[in-house]
Amino acid sequence: PFKAIEKTGDDEAVDLSAYKNVWVFAEQRNGKLMNVALELIGEGYRLAKEISADTKICAVLIGDNIGHLADECYAYGAEEVILIEDPLLKNYTTDAYTKVLVDACHEYKPELVIYGATHIGRDLAPRVAARMNTGLTADCTRLDIKVSSYIEYADKNTTLDTSTLDPKDPSTGIKQTRPAFGGNLMATIICPKTRPQMSTVRPGVMQKRDKVEGAKGELTVYKPQIAESDIHVKIVDIVKSAKELVSLTDAEIICSGGRGLGDPSGFELIKKFADKVGGVVGSSRAAVDAGWIDHSHQVGQTGTTVKPKIYFACGISGAIQHLAGMQTSDIIVAINKDPDAPIFEVADFGIVGDLYKVIPQIIEEWDNA
Ligand code: FAD
């Protein structure tokens, strides 16, 4: 049942002094950490050190028999791992994960909790936030610890020197930025007066720290209070999709096709291209909407956010919603027959031409290289 949340008056004193440290929900599946967990440890480290030198970045591992993942968390920057293990946590269930994470938040009082905006993160974060009576900003692409005050936003005539604000002042919060109105503007959101502050962050947006093999940190083992009666769903079987599994977020090279392919058979050429360069097939939404390829390949605001070493955009115009999902790629190569296509504005290399002529030439050159 939902609990009504009492609205607090603006003047009400809120004691935030007990809240400290930055937590990352270190999502794992089948005993393997998700890439986004490592990205968020990197981002969390940066945020923690901006708050204060003694603010720690903690990775929260939930599952069963997953203690071995702690070393990977340390190697990517975690200073503490909070390990929550139980056979009932082996597979993700909303009830069980919410309960143990809420209990742990009450026990340790983190200042900030960040989750990957994955299917699991998007399911878990709002429930934890609701039970903690705190705010949540979903789908962030940027987090800034530089303290902002809600007053700054409530009254546009008020000019505040934000650098003088105290992060422990309840009227402040971190700046969380997320795309809004179809990606046409970036909204800056703060959740003052409540702690922990919570955000889900898109995969592929934040930077991992360089891996330090053998790095060590603190280990806190939290014994969860969880019983079968807490879990209202029963996982009978886990069936992998019969469809080809696409791992766009982890791919180093992505070859994406758009409406410029002309018809679905164009993806045969894109697949051949991707196989040749050791890449994964991506697509624009127009190609997905036309039914040429499955949505799991879609890159962009309503698809997957990617950050490969090389992104080939073939017959893709470069709409803002597509760019939102790929513009932080290390190298962008655009192939488009329209020299004025907006994709060329973000491309590092642009080839103006018919993709049906250009791609076979690249494949041939690749063979000769
Ligand atoms: P087009 O814009 O039609 O571009 C096709 C390009 O192919 C053109 O530039 C053309 O010059 C070129 N071309 C044609 N023939 C050839 C050829 N033979 N050789 C080379 N070039 C050729 N889009 C996404 O991609 N991802 C999203 O997640 C996404 N989310 C959205 C969310 C919302 C709320 C909205 C409103 C839209 C979203 N869109 C998204 C759609 C987006 O606005 C564009 O419509 C879409 O990205 C266009 O896809 P496209 O570039 O393949 O097609």
Image (cartoon, rainbow, N blue to C red):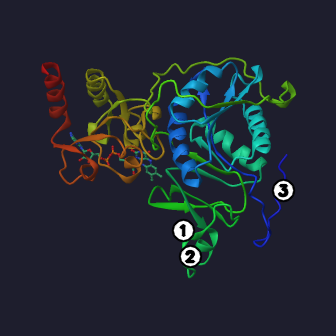
Tell me if label 1 and label 3 are in contact, CB under 8 Å: no
Q: Nearer the viewer, residue 47 or 240?
A: 47
- Mark 3 neighbour class, 10 Å CA radius: few under 14, some 14 to 19, many 20 or more: few
Q: Is residue 29 visible?
A: no
Answer with left or right where residue 170 lies relative to residue 302: right
Asked whether the viewer can see residue 91, the reply is yes
Q: Quadrant of residue 148?
A: bottom right
The quarter of the displayed image where residue 193 is located: bottom right
Secondary structure beneath dot 1 equals helix
- Residue at image position (75%, 71%) is 10
Amino acid type at mark 2: Leu
Mark 1 touching mark 2, by CB under 8 A? no
User: Does the beta carbon at disc 3 come under 8 Å from ligand 1?
Assistant: no
Nearer-N-terminus badge (1/3): 3
Residue at the disc numbered 2? 160
Depth check, mark 1 against mark 2: the one in front is: 1
Q: How many marks?
A: 3
CB of mark 2 within 8 Å of CB of mark 3? no
Task: Indicate which label's residue lies in the foreground, 2 or 3.
Answer: 2
Tag nearer the camera, 1 or 3? 1
Residue on which disc 3 sits:
4
* Residue at x 50% of width, y 38% of height: 39
Please determine whether, in this image, residue 217 is positioned above or below residue 138. above
The residue wearing badge 1 is: 163
Report x, y in % for residue 367: 16, 19
- C-alpha separation, residue under disc 1 versus residue under disc 2: 9 Å
**Residue 314 x/y as whole percent:** 26, 38
Q: Tag 3, which secondary structure? A: loop
**The C terminus appears in which quarter of the rendering?**
top left
Q: Mark 2 vs mark 3: which is more N-terminal?
A: 3
